[in-house]
Amino acid sequence: MQRTETPWGPWEPAALSEVVRLFSAARVPWWIAGGHAIELAVGHSFRGHDDIDVLLLRRDQLAAQQVLPDWEWWAADPPGTLRPWRAGECLPPSVHDIWCRPGPASPWRIQVMLDEAEGDEWVSRRHRAVRRPLRLAGARSATGVPYLAPEIQLFYKAYGTGEKDERDFTAALPVLGGEQRRWLARSLHVAYGDHPWHDRLGR
């Protein structure tokens, strides 16, 4: 378990197994996201993680409070700051990042991300023209863990790529099918224009 310091207190991410146990009680779709999602798609771990992300659709956001009823929930509102997320409060579209911890003396353990949806389509919060049928937005590992589809996770990682994002792209590229590569290439072009990953995806 990797511990890091932030201006709002330390992060000590929960184990994947703990997150799966907690969110298995949710009655709405949810997916492991971030670098853990890439590792689930690849089938093995290959780097450390500063946090662990769970993705919910914005319309299902209160499920986070329901599966973590005794925890503290803090919303990044506005981004770059944290404020308590009140029980039953529906967060506005400008807020898509929630930090969760068991109590005020505990480190942060789980980060909940909110994404948009219209009907049966996932809609990118970065560019509303970037969409994916919800049935293709996630997958399940061999042990049944739901995770965000790697092409969607890589789409988000493509914005301001850092060293770990490049590592994730390199690791995930071999497991992307042709349709996934084409979707990611089109989506990168729509949202970001020309991108360094285009050539490796195949134009």
Image: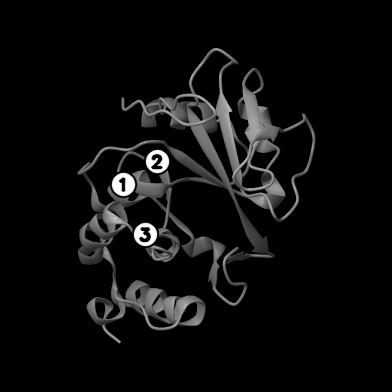
Coordinates of residue 119 in the picture (x, y in percent) = 69, 65
> Mark 3: which amino acid?
Pro
Mark positioned earlier in the residue sequence (3 or 1): 1
Instruction: Give the quadrant of residue 175.
Output: bottom left
Q: Earlier in the sequence, mark 2 or mark 1?
A: 1
Residue 143 versus residue 117 in the image, above or below: above
**Which residue position is annotated with label 2?**
145
| In this picture, residue 199 sits left or right of residue 71 | left
The extreme front residue here reads 7
Query: Which amino acid does the dot numbered 1 rest on?
Result: Leu
Provide the secondary structure element on which disc 1 rests.
Answer: helix
The tag on residue 74 is none
Q: Residues within 10 Å of mark 3 (few under 14, many from 20)?
A: many
Question: Which amino acid, mark 2?
Answer: Val
For the residues carrying marks 2 and 1, which lies nearer the camera in this image?
1
Quarter-wise, where is residue 176 in the image? bottom left
Q: Residue furthest bottom?
A: 203
Residue at the spot of label 3: 150
**What is the quadrant of the N terminus in the image?**
top left
Asked if the residue at tag 1 contacts the one at tag 2, i.e. Cβ–Cβ closer than 8 Å, the answer is yes
Tell me residue 129's x, y (percent): 59, 77
* Label 2, label 1: how far apart the Cα atoms are: 8 Å
For the point 55% across and 12% down, the residue is 105
The C terminus - image quarter: bottom left
Mark 1, residue position: 40
Crowd rating for badge 1 (residues with CA inside 10 Å; few <14, some 14–19, many 20+): many
